[in-house]
Image (tube, rainbow, N blue to C red):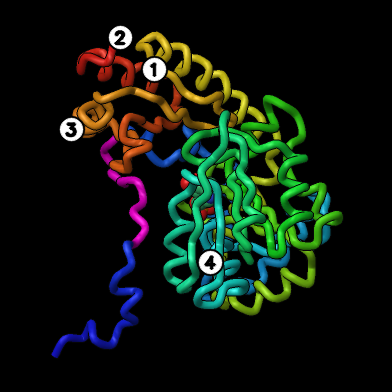
Amino acid sequence: MDPLRFVRPDVVALEGYVPGAQRADALKLNTNECAWPASPRVAEAVQAVVDGLVRYPDPLATALRVDAARHYGVTPEQVLAGNGSDDCLTMLFRAHLAPGDVVAAPDPTYGLYRTLAGVQGARYVGVPYGEGWAVPDLAATGARLALVAHPNNPSGTLAEVDALRRLADRLEGVLVVDEAYVDFAEAARGPCSLIPYLGAHPNLVVLRTFSKSFGLAGARLGLLFAHPALVAQYAKVKDSYNVDSFAQAAGRAALADTAHHRDVVARTLDERARLAAALAAFGWTFPDSDANFLLCHVGPDAERLYRALGDEGVLVRWWSRPDLRACLRISVGRPEHTDRLLDALRRHGAAG
Ligand SMILES: Cc1ncc(COP(=O)(O)O)c(C=O)c1O
């Protein structure tokens, strides 16, 4: 008997999301994790949770939501926590999309959006980015849910706040602005988050993560900000205890240590500048990045370099799709990581 007969045919046909490789022994410049550890306060906070593990976690992560609301200038009713921002995305897709509904995003962008659409049986429309990575008109797709990563992954480019607000106004649906990397942008440019505009746009949802600038990718913690009426719907479709006690405590401690966070973001920007200058000397080009990675146009050597680096334990990201196959996406590491990467690239003949 073939047990696959009992699986939804569209799930059998689905191409699952393939995350960047995780190898404990490698230099990981492939999944845009933070190059520096989280605040030391996180370890203390997590330790303090151990004695309470006999209990379930707070299903709504109330203390974390209260802290986050204060930190980001909203009310707790506008905040929901997820098991990573991926979990927040899952709630959004569940809540908004029935089979056949349209979900749209600029292309290329974070690959999980397409996978989640597939899981939901929704129709995913990727609209190519315009010249200079300008956000295309997603309203024309008739999408019920539109997503823009701001800054975008894999390009590192920032959308214009006014353009996003106009899109929210025009869309007959909900606009999700995925701000996984926005802390790096704000440190360089000043305010560019959409959180302050939530009150003006009831169909706007903003996502944040603790996986990038806060150095907590392994804790799995993300935040969703939206109109309280929407938050109440998402709370209904989330897994009941979606954020464990460790992650709730870790997030509160990380948010409280603003000096550590500022310092890590500043170091990342310094090292990004050094990495960019070194890679530009190879003749590589990249869009101006507002994130903790660079999308380098390498040319026909990209796949060979990706494999050669991987063989010696230096992981970067490469995709086989035609518009990205000449590119490598490289996360910003610590200075010694940059040195090791550059040394490996030179030995493998990257120098232009
Ligand atoms: C644009 C974007 N959104 C969301 C995520 C996922 O973040 P999390 O670790 O919070 O699930 C990533 C991770 O790479 C990302 O690039």
Q: Residues within 10 Å of mark 4 (few under 14, many from 20)?
A: many
Residue 284's disc number: 1
Q: Secondary structure at mark 4?
A: helix
User: Of the residues tagged 1 and 3, which is closer to the observer?
Assistant: 1
Q: Position of residue 100 (x, y in %)?
A: 51, 74
Question: Neighbour class for label 2 at 10 Å: few (<14), some, many (≥20)?
Answer: few
> In the rendered structure, does residue 287 fall within the stretch colored magenta?
no
Indicate which disc, 4 or 2, sits on the residue closer to the N terminus: 4
Residue contact between numbered discs 1 and 2, judged by CB atoms under 8 Å: yes
Query: Looking at the image, is mark 1 or mark 4 nearer the viewer?
Result: 1
Residue 244 is at least partly visible in this image: no
Counting residues from the start of the chain, the first of labels 4 and 3 encountered is: 4
Residue extending farthest to the left is 1
Which residue: 33% across, 67% down?
14
Q: Position of residue 241 (x, y in %)?
A: 56, 74
For the stretch drawn in magenta, the main secondary structure is loop
Q: Earlier in the sequence, mark 1 or mark 3?
A: 1
How far is mark 4 from mark 2, CA to CA? 43 Å
Which residue appears at 55% of the width and 52% of the height? 105
For the residues labelled 4 and 3, the Cα–Cα distance comes to 34 Å
Badge 3 element: helix
The residue carrying mark 4 is 90
When asked about the image quadrant of residue 193, the answer is top right
Q: CA distance from mark 1 to mark 3?
A: 22 Å
Res 352 label: 2
Q: Is residue 248 visible?
A: yes
Q: Amino acid at mark 4?
A: Thr
Q: Residues within 10 Å of mark 1 (few under 14, many from 20)?
A: some
Q: CA distance from mark 3 to mark 2?
A: 22 Å
Which stretch appears magenta? 16-26
**Residue located at (55% from left, 77% from top):** 98
Checking the image for residue 311, the label placed there is 3
